[in-house]
Each structure stands twice: as C-alpha cells, then as structure tokens.
Amino acid sequence: MSQQLTQHFPFLEKMKKYPSSLFYKGDVTLLDRPKVSIVGTRKPSAYTRHFTHMLAKALAKRGVCVVSGAAMGVDAIAHTGAGEDNTIAVVANGVDIRYPAINKNMIEAIEKKGLVLSQFEEGFKATGWSFVVRNELVVALGEMLVITEAGLDSGSMRSAEYALAMGKKIFVLPHRLGESSGTNTLLQSYQATPIYDIETFASQFGTAVDECVQKDDFFYFCQGAPTFDETLAQFGDRVYEAELEGIVTIQNGIVRLA
C-alpha cells in the first residue's frame, strides 16, 4: 500500500502549483538528500547510455540522490547507475502500477530500497498530460537538471522549460552535429552548460567516497561543509572519530568530507 506525504517541501514551491497530493512507496528520507534530476530520450545512443550510467554512479558515490521518471532509456539507466537505494522514481500513474512493464523489476526494487513518488492516487493509469505533470515534479525535486540526450520536440525539452522557469541550472552531454538536436539547441542558445568531464561535474558535490563508508546523517550533514562548532553540537564526538577514520578533514574551522 502507498502512503501520502503530509509535510511541506519548500523546494516544490517553484512548481506552477504546489502538488495537492504526493503518494509514495519507499524511503522518504531521500527527499532530504542532495538531489540531481537526470532525464533524456527513451532511445539513447551507446555514447549516451555509457555516460549517463557513469554520471549517475559518480553522483551516488558522493551521496547525491538521482531523480528521474522511471521511463525506458535514459531514465532507467540513471536509476540503475545510481543504485536502487539512492534514487527517486517519479511516476505518471498511481504507485501501485509499475509502468512501463519493461521496468517493472527496477521499479519494485526502488520501492523497497529507494523512493517512488506520484501525484496520482492508486489505480490511476498514465495519460499524456500526466507525463507532463510527472516531468515538472522530476525537475522540481533536483537542485539542477541534467539532460543527457534529447530531440528538439521531446518531453525532455519540456523539462528544460520547467527548469528555466524555476531558475535551475541545466547541464547536458555534448553531442556531435546532427545528434541530440534538443540539447545542442540549449547549448547554442546559452541555456545549458556542457559536461565535458564526469568527475569534474560530480566533484561539486564533494569527493567520491569508498562504498564501505556509511552514508548516514553525519555524512550528509558534512556534505554542506558545516563549521566545526555546528558539527560538534549536532553529532558530538562523532566528528573526532570521523577525522581519525579519514572520513572528514577539519581545516580553518570547517568540516569537509575527505
């Protein structure tokens, strides 16, 4: 059974209208994490598939939650690259329906370890307009939008319009002439920034950490480079232990992930 979110999320206030209802299955604490939205074509090239997966994985290593729309193609690759416990899938139907069917297993895995969100009640089947609603929520959830490949008249370009209206930065993978006409148009009009190096892009969220490092509340708190006093007040001796373990560094009164 799905549940309904009751708390208010300031980052959704930039939507045309704040969602009247939000239904979910999974771990709602992912909403408190740094988040990046990744979208794109349902039929990506081999180049796009490779770098979308690499990008999602690089972000996940830094504790960034990847948001996408659970569709075929780029969406599914982004969810998979991030890992089912580090991703939010926004769907255009009720959360009791796993659509598209080809992604059924992936969506079920995200329900168990990640988070599936919808603005629609159980039993609601996706329609043309509900995908548009879904796209706006995907964009609103992320701190920025990444479009890895898109045609000129695609849903991803509608997502770009939402991002621009919300004042969010748009990033794209660079493509050759004649490919990904949508993202190339965004670059040509200076509405998007190209990602030339995955690690350089992901490093704005900190350094990659070993998978054995526990990504707990302390980890996510330190992502924001808090002061030593703030960290000590919040977590006590944990900050000293983390420094000894090499998880954080403390310099000039600031705590940062190592």
Image (cartoon, rainbow, N blue to C red):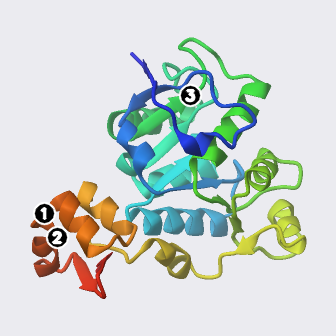
Residue 69 pos. (x, y %)? 60, 41
Disc number lying in front (3 or 1): 1
Alpha carbon separation for disc pair 3 and 2: 37 Å
- From the image, tell me which residue sits under label 1: 236
- From the image, tell me which residue sits under label 2: 239
- Secondary structure, mark 2, is helix
Pointer 2 with pointer 1, Cβ within 8 A? yes
Say which amino acid is labelled 3. Answer: Ser
- Secondary structure, mark 3, is strand
Q: Locate residue 22 relative to residue 231 in the image: left or right.
A: right
- In the depicted structure, whether residue 1 falls above or below residue 29: above
Q: Residues within 10 Å of mark 1 (few under 14, many from 20)?
A: few
Say which amino acid is labelled 1. Answer: Gly
Residue 8 pos. (x, y %)? 51, 33
Residue 217 pos. (x, y %)? 26, 54
Q: Locate residue 155 relative to residue 146 in the image: left or right.
A: right
Disc number lying in front (2 or 1): 1
Write the residue at 27% across / 66% down: 230
- Work out whether mark 3 precedes mark 1 in sequence or the reverse, and give the earlier one: 3
Q: Quadrant of the C terminus?
A: bottom left
96 or 230, which is in the foreground?
Answer: 230
The disc at residue 118 is: 3
Disc number lying in front (3 or 2): 2
- Work out whether mark 3 precedes mark 2 in sequence or the reverse, and give the earlier one: 3
Residue 25 pos. (x, y %)? 41, 28
